[in-house]
Image (spheres, coloured by chain):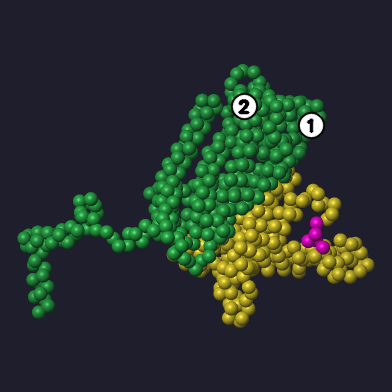
Chain colours: A yellow, B green
Amino acid sequence: MIAGFIDGPLWYFSLTVFCIGVLWKLASIIFGKRKNDLSVARASGIPGAIKTVFSRFKADKGMVPHIRVQIVAGYMFHLGLFAVLFFAAPHILFIEENLFNLDKIGINWLAMPHWAFIVASEFAFLGLLMLWLHRLMNPVSRLISTADDHIAAILTFVVMLTGCMALLEGFSELRLLHRFCVELFLIYFPFSRLIHAFTFIPSRAFTGAWFGRRGISS
Amino acid sequence: MSNSFMLKHSQIFTRPIYCVIYLLLLFCLFLPFSASASGPATSKVNNPANDLWMSVRHNTESGKITSQVKSLDSTVLINSRAEQWTWFRMTLLIKYSIVALVLMIIVILLIFLIRGKIKLQNGLSGNMVHRFTDYERIIHWMLAILFIFLATTGLILLFGRPLLIPILGQEVVAIMASASKEGHNLFGPLFFVSLILMLFRFIKRNIYERGDLTWLLRGGGMIGKSHVTGGFFNMGEKTWYWMVILIGLAISVSGLTLVSPSLGQGRLIMELSHVIHSVAAIILITVALGHMYLASKGTEGTLESMKTGYVDIKWAEEHHDRWAKECHENNKIISAQDYARLQGKNIPNQSPDQSSLVEERK
């Protein structure tokens, strides 16, 4: 009964909340009312927007000595998680079969080997742990952090952990536990700062365009 | 026809005499098996396969044993040592692990009940001194979190059969064991990385120096009445650091050997690795329980160093007087107000009375 609920109604509900929530957030950012910029543009905003989307992947030189831990841990976590999410064999199989029926229209991609999966998840775990501990240990980070940040970090960790614990695929209970955690994560996602996974691009583009119009190199 | 047969057949079991005969026949049928099980009473019949299996077990005709698998030990078909290993794993290890852990918990409870929290003789002053950077505390807590996770999953794997199955049942323990194994294998390398980071970050301050032996001989201040001197780390802390590093390395290396069975190591190395891994882990878990108690509930003002990075100067003077002296000489002490500000607490007015801040920190 519980298995049926997790695999069925709860899954569709969480997916709906996630999709509508993300679309709603993005739409509110893109189509939201803003003050008209009345100044004469020195240049087009588009090159600035595109440039900033990519240039922000590199930390500012002056800041590097102060945020070394965050840079290293941040990249470790995000790249590791990206690799695990989209290139782990069980995830690819799940996406192909359940999410978009991609296998029926012939879209598929290669899974990474098992050792690469282990390395990627090790990176993701280490990075996330370091980032969360930094949030707790650094007085400034601690002060600007809210309960949402901690819940998001812990939830992400639990999702990853239950996934790795179900790696053997020997017990359906472990798979269900992982799926239940994923569903909680999807429901929580649009209402938390986890949404930055989608909003970082429009956010950077907006800043870049604003700077570009004023001729500021960013 | 068949009905009458069934009737007759069922009638047989209703008459006592037939039942007795039936039971006697059954007894006679199983007599040879029970006799052979009792052993010496029967005459010995040589099994023609005995010699073959003896030679296989002792590998006396190793030249004749061949295998398609070209790797170490691939021609060993029966591993006699495995019995000793199983005996060690299932009997000695479990028994002495439980004894060690329970004894340590009893000792901690006794210390807590008899001695209570070890308070500072002169109390907290409120003036603070910086002890650990953010990075150092991140490494410490990372190692601690990973250690607790690995210890828990490791103990589930160790005690699952004798302790958990009677309580939780086979199915639940099987799921827990599967999850623990995967988690344990995955987090093991992270523990190794954290250990290396800790080794390099703290090694300089943990080299033994003059005066450390005095600390040891005086039992860290437990023996005698006069004050026992200490530097940035005292002898006890240095010894704990080296225990974590050396035993941790032994655990990590043996664990990585176990988790990668296809690196070319034979059965002997695997069995030895398991023995080293489990014994070292139990030692570290046992001592870590003491460390956790002393660094939190056991001693006043100690946990703060790993929470905020700062300690009270009175704490430093009492436990690490040589380091405290250096801090005084280099003007590294900050007031309670400055400390509160650094921690992001709002202090409306600078009050000469710092007791409220001290109370808050308590």
Task: Tell me residue B6's x, y (percent).
Answer: 12, 73
Left or right of residue A55: residue A18? left
Task: Using the rendered view, name the quadrant where residue B58 is placed.
Answer: bottom left
Callout 2: few (<14), some (14-19), or many (20+) C-alpha neighbours within 10 Å?
some
Left or right of residue B352: residue B220? left
From the image, state whether disc 1 or disc 2 is nearer to you: 2
Callout 1: few (<14), some (14-19), or many (20+) C-alpha neighbours within 10 Å?
few
B323 or A52: which is nearer to us? Answer: B323
* Position of the N terminus of chain B by quadrant: bottom left
Res. B86 visible in picture: no
Q: Which residue is mark 1?
A: B332
The CA span between labels 1 and 2 is 28 Å
> From which residue to which does the magenta span run?
A55-59
Q: Which mark is residue B216?
A: 2
Task: Tell me residue A77's x, y (percent).
Answer: 68, 57
Secondary structure, mark 2, is helix
Left or right of residue A118: residue B1? left
Q: Residue at x 47, y 34 (%)?
A: B103
A52 or B175: which is nearer to us? Answer: B175
Chain letter, disc 2 residue: B
Task: Using the rendered view, name the quadrant where residue B358 is placed.
Answer: top right
Q: Residue at x 56, y 70 (%)?
A: A94
Q: Which mark is residue A32?
A: none
Majority secondary structure in the magenta region: loop
Task: Tell me residue A159's x, y (percent).
Answer: 58, 58
Secondary structure, mark 1, is loop
**Outermost residue toward the bottom in this view:** A105
**Callout 1 amino acid:** Lys
Task: Using the rendered view, name the quadrant where residue B240 is placed.
Answer: top right
